Amino acid sequence: MKKALIIIIITLGVLVLGFFILNRYIYNAKQAPSQDVSINSYEDCAAAGYPILESYPEKCQAPDGRTFTRKLTDEELANMAVPAIMRGVFTCLPHRDTSGPVTLECAYGFQAEDGNYYALKDENRDKGLFDLSIGEEVEIRGLFIPEKSEKYNSQGVIEIQELYVIEEEEEEVVEEEDVLLETDNYSFVAPSVNLDYASLRDWQVSLIDEKGVLLERVLDGQLVCRETAVDDNPNYSVSRITSDRAQYCLETASEGAAGSVYTEYSFYTLFSGDLIVIKFTAQYPQCYNYDDPEKTDCL
């Protein structure tokens, strides 16, 4: 008896639930207009007398919510076309509706520099459109027809008249040139030096005729160079440099600023009895501001 009662209660519950589901389905069916399977185009919609929306091209709206757009004639399209020159990237046109599954076909298109997309038309297949690779930067000249696609995100169609692939411009490497410096009857060529971290600047050459400097630097026609000890002053030093062709007295003076050390080098030498000084400044970065491997390379 108890088992039979449980079966009856379950049966009644199923019947009640089924009643509510069926009632809801009938209600929704009455609320939503049925789709007219005979309406499949703008012409069908307009012939059935459904409302024509104010747009160009015209659109017809069926009772079930579908809209159909009138296709423009070739003459109308030709009258709408305007000359266009655009630069951008050859790409696949994105779909307008991405809320559901999206097909994987590639509709050839073009994304201009302003971010807008355009469909491309190469009617005679002789403009090079089908030789392009996705991502290539191009310049397109042709006729723009503002005919939007219902499937793809595009502002219209560009009928290609000329197409150019924009070659990537190679960065011009400017080689530093030797600089000719002149003073009185002497000239000096400042050599070009390319360094990864340091830089050389402010080259100058001068003929010294101040008596005080001459007395300090020249004695009996010989170059005087009072060298400093290694530990005297880390920011200032004087040393003698002897080469096969000349002798120099080198003064260096350093100071730090804004993460760099600036060292001025002054090379004094006698040339045809005259005292000449050649100067330049070197900028050295604080190598410990880098992380390895740059720090080690800089050091």
Image: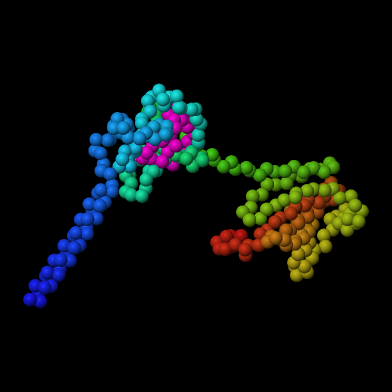
Residue at (63, 43) in percent of width and height = 175
Foreground residue among 51 and 91: 51
Residue at (71, 55) in percent of width and height = 282
Applied colour scheme: rainbow
Image x and y of residue 181, in percent? 77, 43
Foreground residue among 177 and 3: 3
Image x and y of residue 293, in percent? 55, 61
* Residue 282 showing in the rendered view: yes
Residue at (18, 60) in percent of width and height = 18
| Furthest residue toward right | 211
Residue at (50, 30) in percent of width and height = 84
Image x and y of residue 166, in percent? 50, 36
Which image quarter is the C terminus in? Answer: bottom right
> In the image, is residue 43 part of the stretch drawn in magenta?
no
Foreground residue among 108 and 37: 37
Query: In the shown orientation, is residue 213 left or right of residue 67?
Result: right
Which image quarter is the N terminus in? Answer: bottom left
Asked if 247 appears above or below 147 in the picture, the reply is below
For residue 180, which quarter of the picture? Answer: top right
Asked if 169 appears above or below 202 in the picture, the reply is above
> In the image, is residue 147 part of the stretch drawn in magenta?
yes
Magenta extent: 135-161
* Residue 119 showing in the rendered view: no
Foreground residue among 72 and 83: 72
| Furthest residue toward left | 1
Query: How many numbered circles does the render carry?
Result: 0
